[in-house]
Image (cartoon, helix red, strand yellow):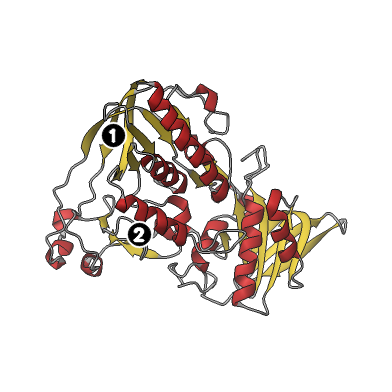
Amino acid sequence: MSEQQKTVLVVGGGFSGLTAAVETAEAGFNVVIIEKTPFLGGRVTQLNKYFPKLCPPNCGLEINFKRIKNSGDISFYTLAEVEKISGQEGNYDVTIKQNPRFVNDKCVGCNACNEACPVEMPNEFNFGLDKTKAAYITHNQAFPFKYVLDSKNCKGKSCAKCVEACKYDAINLDMKPEAVNLKVGAIVFATGWDLYDVTKLDLLGGGKIKNVITNMQMERLASPNGPTSGKILRPSDNKEVNNIAFVQCAGSRDENHLPYCSYICCMASLKQATYLREQYPDSKVQIFYIDIRTPGRYEQFYWKVKEDPNVTLTKGKVAKVEEDPATGDVLLTVEDVLLGKKITAKFDMVVLAAGMVPSTRTSKIPTDISYTNDGFVVPASLKKGMFAVGTLKSPVDVSRSVQDATGVAIKSIQSVRRSI
């Protein structure tokens, strides 16, 4: 086979994309990964722990990063996007736009540019819970471990304090976008998911009440590399959280927002309940749900959390979320189904179990692909030699994404062999 025929393009550098890439490369094929953000790892890098084992995600990521480093068959582009795809199985032409990082390979991660940078901006990696500099690296295990200058907020040559501070000549403010043309035999789409915009949930106070946060913000609060170094503190006053509520199906299973179940939300809230209970032994957790869904082997994890006397599960839909202006506490009005009446309860902080939205809902893949009304890829519509993986097809957890990606690696190998 030619090098072109033996090359598989993986679009998306999250966990499913990385899995597909390393499994394909270790079978003897060339792989090119493109990732739209400055770093590989995707959403998993923002998690504190996986369920149900409750182990940190950087363990699995570190293994995959090492496999990439040790492989001569994997190359990758960050800050890159697919602009055009043409051709057919075994002979695809792909045009990629690589946006400038403004930092070259001489970077040693010394942090001097960050310290010198005068520009602060909301920290997207921490979902706006704190600020970061326009010269930044997301966390201490980021890959590649190389700083990036934010093109929207960096003042460029009118400032250039980062250039003065860098002893390694690693910053180049003259970098421009570049077009990269690739010839590949097969393409794997693994562009991941986004969190549902909770500012659309007026009744739940999303985006309007400071101590109402999303489930992904909760992950960042509990993470050792998060904005509070792992201490679960509420955003308004950094008070320790001892009484917390989780509101399930925040946007999901609602024809006005996301009509489907987002699959991971119940397990995520049960997991996050353990974060608080372990950190503050006297803390209390209440989970308001429509239905608790813990498919397959996750049922045992549900039983374990449910048996905690300081965790209460209440079947009922939250009708209203309000703020106590005097204390910053959050008031919930809930229809308790089992009691058959409305109840009102006060909490230090409330976590909205926001739903999962495929990235393709707002950013379509530039080729002829069909989507469901909710933005998920219809696998049968993909041309031969193209494969969608993980959350592009339906909401799934990390474990199922990895399984799917391993299967897709085999399919991509079969595809390039068919084209000989």
Q: Amino acid at mark 1?
A: Ile
- Residue closest to the far bottom: 282
* Residue at screen point 35% across, 48% down: 37
Counting from the top left corner in percent of width and height, residue 348 is at 63, 71
Q: How many marks?
A: 2
Q: First in sequence, mark 1 or 2: give its number.
A: 1
Quadrant of the image occupied by residue 91: top left
Q: Secondary structure at mark 1?
A: strand
| Labels 1 and 2 touching (C-beta < 8 A) | no
| Disc 1 crowd, CA 10 A, few/some/many (<14, 14-19, 20+) | some
Is residue 208 at all visible to an observer of this figure? no
Counting from the top left corner in percent of width and height, residue 155 is at 21, 56
Counting from the top left corner in percent of width and height, residue 375 is at 53, 33
Above or below, 322 against 366 in this view is below
Q: Amino acid at mark 2?
A: Ala
Q: Which mark is residue 346?
A: none
Query: Closer to the camera, 164 or 385?
Result: 385
Quadrant of the image occupied by residue 403: top right
23 relative to 107 in the view: left or right: right
Counting from the top left corner in percent of width and height, residue 203 is at 65, 52
Query: Closer to the camera, 373 or 89?
Result: 89
* Residue at screen point 35% across, 59% down: 142
Query: Closer to the camera, 270 or 24?
Result: 24
Query: Closer to the camera, 388 or 27?
Result: 27
The residue where tag 1 is placed is: 96
Q: Quadrant of the N terminus?
A: top left
Q: Which mark is residue 142?
A: 2
Q: Quadrant of the C terminus?
A: top left
Q: Secondary structure at mark 2?
A: loop
Between marks 1 and 2, how big is the CA–CA gap? 23 Å
| Disc 2 crowd, CA 10 A, few/some/many (<14, 14-19, 20+) | some
